[in-house]
Image: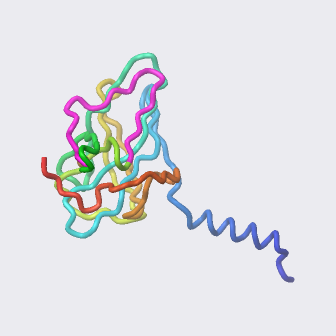
Amino acid sequence: MRPTASALAALLLALGLAAGPAQAHDYAAGALKIGHPWSRATPGGARVAAGYLTVTNTGSTPDRLTGGSLAAAGRTEVHTMSVEKGVMRMAPLPNGLEIPPGGTITLAPSGHHLMFMDLKTPLKQGERAAGTLTFERAGTVPVEFVVESIAAKGGGQGAGKGDKGHAGHDHAH
Ligand SMILES: [Cu+2]
């Protein structure tokens, strides 16, 4: 029997979903909700990678993202990124990022991010890279960073902002 057009459409939709972007994944740590930690695949020889995620504070006390780790990297810093005179600049945030009660912080390409330095092995698309996030109050939380494509813009959220990202950038600070 020939499949009907609608059955065929449903099948294609199912296939499309199966092959689509990595599923979102979330973690909870006390009052914090951690949304979809992810990173980008790195070209061979790259020494740095970046980590992206959201954190929402559902509690009544501020907390602070102070750092993290990646099993494949030597050390991790919290970075901010800004454009000065048309040049993308990054700088470490030694005190991390505050997450106010009821607030959400977003680490995303072209903005705040975790910087994984001294990368020992490349990150490959489709992998889940083991790491941690460190919070002032909530402590150290094990997470997995879903490794998306080298050109991924943002956690399947369809972000379309101009993105120079970290591809090939030189860490000169
Ligand atoms: Cu950076």
Task: Please tell me whether residue 159 is drawn above or below residue 93 in the rendered image.
Answer: below
The magenta-colored residue range is: 88-108
Q: Position of residue 69 (x, y in %)?
A: 26, 45
Is 69 or 83 nearer to us in this picture? 83
Which quadrant holds residue 18?
Answer: bottom right
Residue at 67% in and 65% down = 14
Is 146 or 99 nearer to us in this picture? 99
**Count of all numbered marks drawn on residues in the image:** 0
Residue at 36% in and 58% down = 40
Q: Position of residue 72 (x, y in %)?
A: 24, 56
Q: Is residue 57 left or right of residue 74?
A: right
Residue placed farthest to the left in the image? Answer: 173
Q: Is residue 103 magenta?
A: yes
Q: Is residue 86 magenta?
A: no
Q: Position of residue 112 (x, y in %)?
A: 32, 41
Residue at 24% in and 62% down = 168
